[in-house]
Image: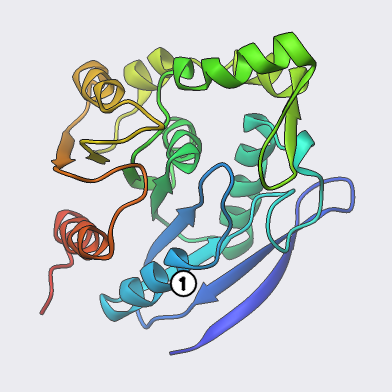
Amino acid sequence: MTETKHRIPVADGERVAAVHHEATGDEWLVFCHGFLSDKTGSYEHRCRRAVERGYDAVRFDFRGCGDSDGRFVEGTLSAKLTDLRAVLEYFDPQSVALFGSSFGGKVAFHAAATDDRVERVVTRAPVTYNRAFEAYRSIVEREGACQFDTGVRIDDRFFDDFDAYDFDAVASSLSVPAAIFHGADDESVPLADSFEAAAALETDVLLERFAGEGHRFSSAAEERLLERTFHWLGRPQS
């Protein structure tokens, strides 16, 4: 299994770090990590499983995360969409499926609504409606910034940009099939938001509720998630 590292130019001399897990075929699956996450850990496993099913798989760090350039505080949703677009243009797949986890799900949804190369979108515990970030907004309004345990922070620049992205626009314009997997006991992103999003989308939607799972899935649930994902994408275990 060949894995190659890439430094992909984005803007202003900055680059994002990506890893391409190569397969023989012409199907691509690109993974978008969560808000305080990066391309390591579960994404390595997901990519290797994708290759076993015949997908060229790519995992990458948004700017300000992991091995990519930039500062986290400047990592608006617009910036993350720019990073994903740069990754797609760099590898230039004819068509691609996106997998987005948590905030990466929001990135994947908004990208899929506007990029003709995206043929399917898979999300796990996705941020859809902006209200999921209201607690962070309140801290920014009160203190000027919201700093996380990891030491990174966001400020009003994040929300000035964030407010330009309404999920209703995705719901009315997304034309490719979508899958949403969500833990019933998610303490970070309400399960109800995924039910509301599924009802609002005007395309085909698969919604699965994982009983007993929180925002982070257990190892067993992760394996079920991958099996369901590949089956839905049309690549069940041979």
Label 1 crowding class (10 Å Cα cut-off): few <14, some 14-19, many 20+?
Answer: some
Locate residue 149 relative to residue 184 in the image: left or right.
Answer: right
Q: Residue lying furthest front in this view?
A: 149
Q: Which residue is mark 1?
A: 44
167 over 148 or under it: above or below: above
> Residue 88 at x, y = what percent?
56, 54
Locate residue 195 relative to residue 99 in the image: left or right.
Answer: left
Please tell me which residue lies in front, 61 or 30.
61
Q: Residue lying furthest right in this view?
A: 13
Rendering colour mode: rainbow
Q: How many marks?
A: 1
Task: Report the residue at 41% width, 70% height from top.
Answer: 47
76 over 6 or under it: above or below: above
Identify which amino acid the numbered label 1 is placed on.
Glu
Task: Report the residue at 62% width, 31% height from top.
Answer: 77
Tell me the element at label 1.
helix
Please tell me which residue lies in front, 156 or 77.
156
Q: Quadrant of the C terminus?
A: bottom left
> Residue 49 at x, y = what percent?
31, 74
> Residue 99 at x, y = what percent?
39, 51
